Image (cartoon, rainbow, N blue to C red):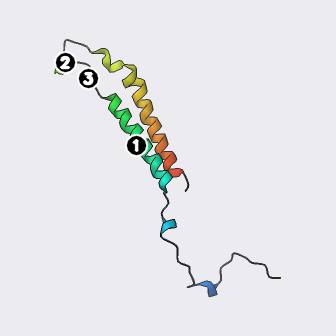
């Protein structure tokens, strides 16, 4: 009985088998789906952060007026949380195996 080993010898040199083009790429359909979901979360998060600044009222800059809308829950908590979740999904999509 001969025991098969995974060791290579000089006689094996030059007898490489051809690797198929399909298995050469790391990411599959599932990875791209998760990447798009993560990108959508990041974009929605940044869109939720948009709005007038502290001294803008009705689209015009007025230094005598303070706009408390910059401290809304949407802009301070929800939007950054969506961006962080989106980046976490991106990391998952990159590290996920086929």
Please name the residue that numbered disc 1 is placed on. Answer: 39
Position in image of residue 10 (x %, y %) = 62, 86
Q: Which residue lies at the image location 49% right of the left edge and 57% below the top edge?
A: 28
Tell me which numbered mark, 2 or 1, is placed earlier along the sequence.
1
Q: Secondary structure at mark 2?
A: loop
Tell me which numbered mark, 1 or 3, is placed earlier along the sequence.
1
Q: CA distance from mark 2 to mark 1?
A: 31 Å
Q: CA distance from mark 1 to mark 3?
A: 26 Å
Please name the residue that numbered disc 2 is placed on. Answer: 58
Establish if 57 lies above or below 40.
above
Position in image of residue 31 (x %, y %) = 49, 51
Residue in the foreground of this view, choosing between 24 and 84: 24
Position in image of residue 96 (x %, y %) = 54, 51
Q: Quadrant of the N terminus?
A: bottom right
Q: Quadrant of the C terminus?
A: bottom right
Whether the residues at callouts 2 and 1 have beta carbons within 8 Å, the answer is no
Residue in the foreground of this view, choosing between 55 and 74: 74
Please name the residue that numbered disc 3 is placed on. Answer: 53
Q: Which residue lies at the image location 18% right of the left edge and 22% below the top edge?
A: 59
């Amino acid at each position: 009985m001969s025991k098969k080993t995974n060791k290579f010898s000089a006689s094996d040199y030059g007898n490489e088998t051809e690797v198929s083009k399909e298995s050469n790429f790391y990411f599959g359909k599932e990875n791209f789906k998760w990447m798009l979901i993560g990108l959508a979360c990041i974009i929605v998060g940044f869109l939720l952060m948009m709005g007038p600044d502290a001294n803008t009222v009705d689209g015009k800059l007025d230094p005598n007026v303070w706009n408390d809308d910059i401290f809304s829950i949407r802009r301070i908590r929800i939007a950054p949380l969506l961006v962080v979740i989106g980046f976490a999904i991106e990391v998952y999509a990159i590290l996920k195996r086929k």
